[in-house]
Structures are given as C-alpha cells and as structure tokens.
Amino acid sequence: MKSQRLGNALANARLQSAPVLKLPPDLALPAIRVLASAKGPEERHQQLVKLRPTIPPRTLLNAYVLPSLKELRLYGGTLRDGSLTRFGEAVAKAAEENDEKGAEVLARQLVALDHERVGFVDWLVSRSRKGNGESQRTVLTEFLRDTTSHDEAPSPAALDRLGKWVGYLVFFRVLRGDSTAGTATSLGVDPRHVKALSEAPGPLPRASVLRDGLLEAYADSMRKVGTQLYIPIALLRDELGDRLLAQGVLLTDAQIDAILRRAPQLLRGYAVTFSPFSGPSRGGLKLAMMYAGFVSVRRGRGASRSRKRQG
C-alpha cells in the first residue's frame, strides 16, 4: 500500500504542471470566437451560455470556459475585464477564415504547451513505430509509469487529468485516435506532422511539384493496398506528406488536406473522384458536401501531354 501511494504521488507530481481542462474541446474554438467578437461582458456572457445551454451558466463560465482557456494561455483576466492573449488572438484571426485554420493554430499552441509542461507528444514520438495503434488507456498508463519510474498502476486522478489533455491533442489533430479520453481505441502519432506543427509554416511548392507528388504518392499507395482504385485518404495523406518531406517541404496534415482538395484542379487530364466511408471512421477529408474516406485517380485523355506541359 505504501509503495502504491508513493507511485500515485509521483504520477500526480508529474502532472502538476499539465493543463487542467474541464472545457469540452469542441467548445474551445467557439468560445474563443465569442470572446474575440462580443462587444461587452453581458454579450460575452449571453453568447457563451448559448454554446452549451444544458450546463448551468455559472459552472460553464467559472469552471469550464475561463479556467481552461487560461490554462491554454489563450485568455487572461475575468469575463468583465479580461481579454484574449496574443495566442488567443492568433487563433481567433485564423478562425475568421475557417474552422480548420483556427484549429491548426490552436494545435500549434498545444504542441508548444505539451513540450514545455507535459512531454507526452515527445514521448510518443520517441516510441517505436510499432507502438502506434495501442489503446489510449494502455499508452497513458505506460507514459505515467515511464515518467515516474514506478511499476505500480497510476491513480485514477492522474489518468483522468492526462486523458483530458490527450483528448485535446486528439481533437485538434496533434495526435491520431478517438477523442474520448481513456477509451480502448487506438492512439498514434506522425512525427512529420508534429514537427510541422512545431515550426513556422512555410510556403507551398509550385503546382507542378504538387502534381508530381500527388501522382507518385498515389502510385505508392496503390502498391501498398494492392488496388488501383479508391485509395484510403489517410494513406494518401501520409504518402504525400512523406514524399514532399523528402524534397525538403514540411507540411502539417491540414496543409496536405488543402492540397488533396485541390487534386481535381492540380491533376488536369485525370479523373479524380472522392468517395465517402461506408461507415463511421477517422482519417478522411472534409469536403463541401461530404466527408470523403477514399479517393480514385484515373488517367484521362491527354494526361501525359498535360503533365508534360505543366512540368
């Protein structure tokens, strides 16, 4: 009993600097929008309460929204006299363009905070590739054991705190997996994506480079899955990201998604067709009218001539 209490104390000490997040991650971006656009405290109060009317207003504001955004260094002060930090303003400005851009700026803040205060992402990246795909609970437990150098099971409180943090990392696409904390679903990480989130975004290469990269990544994907049609979006995203990285172009998953959406325009002379999943799944691509899980690229008339002209 004494050794287990010591182990639990060490686990809790390791997480003392980790953000304490009670705000559901799906409300983070909408809350930042409200705090950026509302004209006064009363309007802020009204708009924030509308985000989740099933939660008592006092609890939502004083226990969820403000403390969590402060933990993420996105907001400072009270509802009446506070304001967004420069990080919060950067998220709000990006979100004015679209949700995906706002989420990526927030993801960059999460990576920086994790590196400074938790170390979970760096730890996960340092593991062997075969570690990807383990259940979240297994990975969280192993992290706490590794960082406390103790073999006893971590306390439920330590697992819950870390689980909520990892839930944010998954929701904002720093990590890959299910956003429900502590579930048995898989958890993974792509070092290329994390590195891209850690560095300032650079310019995209010219269209001809993107075109060649898409075709070569699609060919590599076909060889891996053994079919010429309807390649999983998740596989093509990683193949394209790795191929561009080999050429010195480091991109996040969201930047690669933007390229994939442009595939019909980039691949002139080819028929590009997106197809939805047959059931719920992760790793797809949000399009205007659907959530695509697969993509097909077929050569059309004049494809070779078109590619030669654009190269």
Image: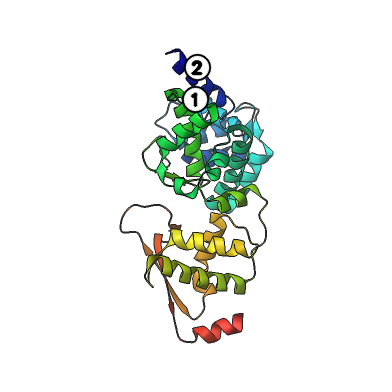
Identity of the residue furthest to the left in this view: 278
Kindly tell me whether residue 23 is visible in this rendering.
no
Asked if marks 1 and 2 touch (Cβ < 8 Å), the reply is yes
Residue linked to disc 2: 6
Where residue 166 appears, x then y in whole percent? 49, 37
Kindly tell me whether residue 284 is visible in this rendering.
yes
What colouring method underlies this structural image? Answer: rainbow
Tell me the number on the disc at residue 66: none
Q: Helix, strand, or loop for circle 1?
A: loop
Q: Residue at x 61, y 50 (%)?
A: 195
Q: Residue at x 36, y 70 (%)?
A: 227
Q: Amino acid at mark 2?
A: Leu
Q: Amino acid at mark 1?
A: His
1 or 2: tag closer to the N-terminus: 2
Residue linked to disc 1: 150
Where residue 281 appears, x then y in whole percent? 36, 52
